[in-house]
Image: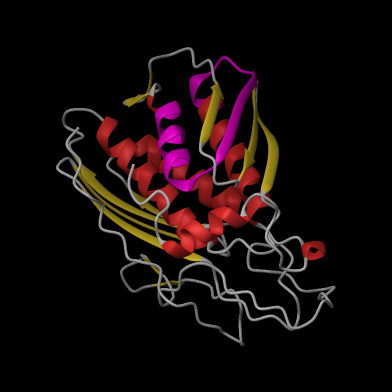
């Protein structure tokens, strides 16, 4: 694949919003999701060690400290190559709104699961050479989502960092363990019995997560515990991934806004703008 450098905005200055720390997207007149003004990463400036006992963020997770300044964690990436044109926006502190049109119906369905079960707002628009196959679109969409996630996480102050969830779907059950560590690694133990679900090549499931891992800097382990229906196995995987990612991105009140150990070097690289700028 011939890949042109993707067009990704640099990380601008973070600004504070005293009113509602997690603005909700609205629905525009055309039915699409209207995201708030572009703000990347999180801004968390602690003025007190006293935590709000009742504060709850937009995704149901604890809010940052009561005396903190927090802006919604958004990421946006435009990736243009010879084969694809991809535009991704993600709000980690959303309400589960999905607006995906990838040209791959089954992948749209899986991205709906990512939004719904992670309580992220996910916008994905993509065109590509799907008349050949879904490989290039599947890969570039995942690369863009991973980069948008990296942007949205910002300095990662106060997050849990780790996530672990097992999702059942009828006879299928899939376990996902992840670490927002800055060290990309994928171990994928899926055994999908059929070559296709609808028109979607099931080999692309592992490739999707490998691409996302590469640009987000995530350590990800996926293990199939049970299942013999291909659709159920893949859907359980995306649901478990969404729930584990939600856990990892939520705030840990006891951490009091500090960066989890081993992630601090990652933060420095993000600030310098030299981490995973292209895969």
Q: Is residue 75 magenta?
A: no
Q: Residue at x 19, y 32 (%)?
A: 1
Query: Can you tell which quarter of the image residue 240 is in?
Result: top right
Q: Nearer the viewer, residue 226 or 246?
A: 246
Q: Residue at x 60, y 61 (%)?
A: 156
Q: Residue at x 55, y 83 (%)?
A: 16
Farthest residue, direction bottom: 18
Does 203 sit left or right of 262 as displayed? left
Q: Is residue 225 magenta?
A: yes
Q: Nearer the viewer, residue 3 or 104?
A: 3
Q: Position of residue 184 (x, y in %)?
A: 51, 38
Q: Position of residue 42 (x, y in %)?
A: 56, 69
Query: Can you tell which quarter of the image residue 134 is in?
Result: top left
Does 165 sit left or right of 88 as displayed? right
User: Considering the image in quadrants, where does the C terminus appear?
Assistant: top left
Q: Position of residue 102 (x, y in %)?
A: 31, 45
Query: Considering only vertical position in the picture, is 58 above or below 141?
Result: below
Q: Bounds of the magenta span?
A: 205-232
Does 51 sit left or right of 161 as displayed? right
């Amino acid at each position: 694949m011939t890949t042109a450098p993707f067009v990704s905005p640099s990380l601008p200055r973070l600004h504070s919003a005293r009113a509602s720390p997690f603005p909700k997207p609205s629905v525009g007149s055309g039915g699409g999701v209207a995201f708030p003004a572009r703000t990347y990463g999180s801004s968390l400036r602690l003025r007190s060690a006293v935590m709000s006992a009742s504060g709850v963020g937009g995704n149901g997770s604890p809010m940052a400290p009561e005396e903190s300044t927090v802006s919604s964690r958004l990421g946006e990436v435009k990736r243009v190559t010879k084969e694809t044109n991809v535009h991704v926006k993600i709000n980690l502190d959303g309400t589960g709104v999905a607006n995906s049109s990838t040209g791959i119906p089954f992948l749209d369905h899986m991205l709906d699961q990512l939004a719904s079960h992670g309580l992220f707002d996910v916008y994905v628009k993509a065109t590509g050479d799907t008349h050949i196959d879904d490989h290039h679109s599947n890969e570039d969409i995942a690369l863009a989502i991973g980069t948008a996630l990296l942007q949205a996480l910002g300095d990662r102050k106060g997050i849990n960092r780790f996530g672990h969830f097992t999702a059942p779907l009828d006879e299928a059950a899939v376990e996902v363990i992840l670490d927002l560590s800055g060290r990309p690694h994928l171990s994928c133990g899926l055994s999908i019995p059929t070559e296709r679900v609808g028109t979607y090549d099931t080999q692309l499931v592992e490739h999707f997560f490998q691409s996302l891992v590469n640009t987000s800097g995530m350590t990800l382990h996926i293990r199939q515990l049970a299942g013999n229906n291909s659709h159920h196995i893949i859907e359980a995987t995306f649901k478990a991934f969404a729930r584990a990612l939600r856990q990892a991105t939520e705030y840990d009140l006891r951490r009091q806004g500090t960066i989890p150990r081993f992630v601090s070097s990652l933060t420095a690289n993000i600030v310098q703008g030299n981490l995973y700028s292209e895969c």
